[in-house]
């Protein structure tokens, strides 16, 4: 086998929402100035959280009352896209940071989603799932979404992060996310069962986070032709992340729109 | 002055929401939200700024939005400049819908 480029692999880490988003931004900023290596990070959210897209508004997307009751955090991402419920026991998130000029990654958004999401596709296939890329930025199994991603590019670096559903709690998802009409809540929950699936539902057995972690590691290595080597955050990354955490946990940022 | 609210679901794409203050057929202030992708992300602030004072006409809105896309070197996924115009022109007077936020 050809000896590929080596990227750093971090995970599985568990942090609160603000720290997770701050680490992703810190890695991207430091990657842009050459002070962080190409990195894939796999992480969980504790407490569970709702993340909203950069262009969304909390009031339109999130039932903050229900979140407070259930102990669910709310965070705005630096990436666009939709609102996501990240269950601390049901969802694994990945983030990938790479230099924008890297020949493995197409220069355009649509092409690079395809290449980077292929890591998810291959990882899920290695678990026995018939996973397929669904443009622009989703991975589906049997036509149902199992993973969604969002990407941003700044200052010469690319950040892509996304979800992998291991087991879905759709009722909880619809308690914390706003539905356009309360009368439609039950209908929307059944519709979501049709549109969304999870690894456990598809495999019909319990699946642990470590098993998914190993699958995604293989998937990204294959898809990108890289070798992933376990590592951790540097002091500089950690301290920039702590600084950025202040922004992500602030009302100004969360309620910016 | 009137407050208008609009929602436009792009076919096979994303949802665009607009909230705007209209005065004499022009936009006084506007906020555009949704689950689309716009790159660079900060372009949204320039878009909203550029739309202030714009007449609520297709030609003028599209011209201003395309102007910002050009000057910012922006691109979007899931919603086009034309879609933003549709969302804005579809906005209607808004009676409190009771957001339920505390």
Image: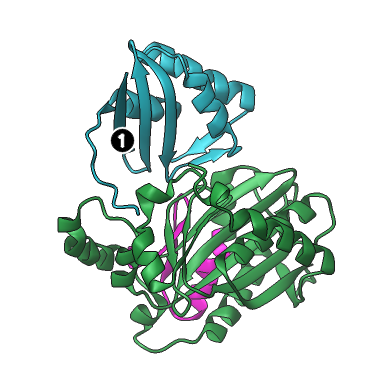
Q: Nearer the viewer, residue A233 or A163?
A: A233
Residue A114 to residue A86: above or below: above
- Rendered-image quadrant of the N terminus of chain B: top left
- Rendered-image quadrant of the C terminus of chain B: bottom left
Q: Quadrant of residue B22?
A: top left
Q: Which colour represents chain A?
A: green
* Residue drawn at (37%, 70%) of the image: A69
Residue A24 place in picture, x, y as percent: 66, 60
- Mark 1 element type: strand
The magenta region covers A117-144
Q: Which colour represents chain B?
A: cyan
* Residue drawn at (36%, 47%) of the image: A60
Report whether A20 appears left or right of A163. Answer: right
Is residue A145 visible to the viewer in this orientation of the structure? no
Report whether A193 appears left or right of A68. Answer: left
- Residue extending farthest to the left is A183
Residue A248 place in picture, x, y as percent: 60, 56
Q: Using a 10 Å C-alpha cutoff, classify the residue at mark 1 as few (fewer than 14 neighbours), some (14 to 19) or many (20 or more).
A: many
């Amino acid at each position: 086998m050809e000896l590929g480029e080596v990227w750093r692999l971090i995970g599985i880490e568990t942090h609160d929402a603000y720290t997770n988003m701050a680490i992703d931004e810190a890695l991207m900023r430091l990657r842009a100035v050459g002070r962080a290596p190409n990195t894939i990070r796999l992480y969980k959210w504790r407490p569970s959280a709702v993340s909203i897209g950069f262009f969304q508004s909390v009031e339109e997307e999130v039932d903050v009352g229900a979140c407070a009751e259930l102990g669910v955090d709310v965070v705005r991402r630096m990436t666009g896209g939709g609102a996501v419920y990240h269950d601390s026991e049901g969802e694994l998130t990945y983030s990938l940071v790479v230099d924008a000029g890297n020949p493995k990654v197409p220069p355009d958004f649509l092409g690079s989603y395809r290449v980077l999401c292929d890591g998810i596709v291959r990882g899920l296939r290695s678990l026995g799932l018939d996973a397929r890329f669904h443009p622009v930025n989703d991975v589906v199994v049997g036509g149902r979404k199992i993973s969604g991603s969002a990407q941003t590019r700044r200052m010469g670096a690319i950040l892509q992060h996304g979800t992998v559903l291991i087991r879905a709690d759709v009722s909880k998802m619809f308690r914390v996310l706003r539905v356009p009409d309360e009368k439609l809540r039950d209908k929307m929950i059944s519709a979501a069962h049709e549109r969304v699936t999870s690894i456990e539902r598809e495999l019909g057995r319990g699946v642990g986070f470590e098993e998914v972690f190993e699958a995604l590691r293989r998937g990204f290595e294959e898809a990108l032709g890289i070798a992933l080597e376990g590592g951790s955050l540097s002091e500089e990354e950690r301290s920039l992340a702590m600084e950025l955490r202040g922004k992500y946990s602030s009302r100004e940022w969360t309620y910016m729109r | 002055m009137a407050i208008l609210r609009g929602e436009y679901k792009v076919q096979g794409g994303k949802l665009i929401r607009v909230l705007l203050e209209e005065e004499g057929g022009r936009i006084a202030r506007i906020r555009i939200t949704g689950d689309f992708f716009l790159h660079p992300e900060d372009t949204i602030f320039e878009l909203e700024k550029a739309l202030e004072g714009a007449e609520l006409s297709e030609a003028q809105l599209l011209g201003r939005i395309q102007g910002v896309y050009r000057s910012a070197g922006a691109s979007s996924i899931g919603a086009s400049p034309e879609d933003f115009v549709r969302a804005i022109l579809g906005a209607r007077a808004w009676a409190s819908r009771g957001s339920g936020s505390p």
